[in-house]
Amino acid sequence: MGFMSYFKTSVKVAAAHPPPTPNNEKFPDALPGALAPPHSRGNSVSPAASTRATQEERLVDEIKHQVVLNHLYQHQCSSLWIRDVSQQIEGVMVRKKRNDYLFKPPGLAESAFAQAMMMLNVQVSF
């Protein structure tokens, strides 16, 4: 019994399990809408529910961006990367979407650095 004998099927096993044949006939007992896509079955979500879901998604996204912003700012402060020697505002900015950023501290928004980073459309900047 060699190594290749493990890959050969025996005659008894092959006869017991015939290869599957394609079945092209339709099932008469199937429901007419059972195979239809979910969006065409009529169980759609109401407009009020979708509006609420959209508002909840926006709120969750806002919270995620705030968490990232606060984490980066705390890490920047704990690593002593902020030195206000030249009286310039230093901090972190995080992009929510194009031309929509969060700043920590908020005064960073008026700095030349922030304006340059917004023109470059960066996601995060220290």
Image: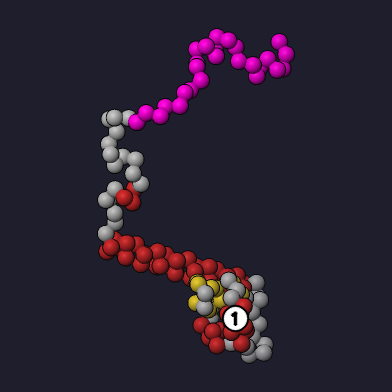
Question: In the rendered image of this protein, does residue 41 appear above or below residue 79?
Answer: above
- Say which quadrant the C terminus sits in: bottom right
Q: Residues within 10 Å of mark 1 (few under 14, many from 20)?
A: few
Q: Looking at the picture, how far across and down is residue 74, in whole percent?
A: 57, 72
- The foreground one among 1 and 101 is 1
Can residue 18 be seen here? yes
- The foreground one among 14 and 50 is 14
Magenta-drawn stretch contains 51: no
Q: Looking at the picture, how far across and down is residue 16, in whole percent?
A: 50, 12
Question: Quadrant location of residue 115?
Answer: bottom right
Query: For the point 55% across and 88% down, which residue is it?
Result: 110
Magenta-drawn stretch contains 10: yes
Question: Quadrant location of residue 88?
Answer: bottom right
Magenta stretch, main secondary structure, is loop
Name which residue type carries label 1.
Answer: Met
> Which element carries disc 1, helix, strand or loop?
helix
- Look at mark 1 in the image and give the residue it sits on: 119
Residue reaching furthest right? Answer: 2
Query: For the point 68% across and 15% down, which residue is it?
Result: 5
- Say which quadrant the N terminus sits in: top right
Residue reaching furthest bottom? Answer: 87
- The foreground one among 36 and 26 is 26
The span shown in magenta is: 1-26
Query: For the point 52% across and 11% down, which residue is it?
Result: 15
Question: In the rendered image of this protein, does residue 107 appear above or below residue 43?
Answer: below
Query: For the point 27% across and 51% down, which residue is it?
Result: 42
In the rendered view, does 124 fall on the left or right side of 42? right
Can residue 89 be seen here? no
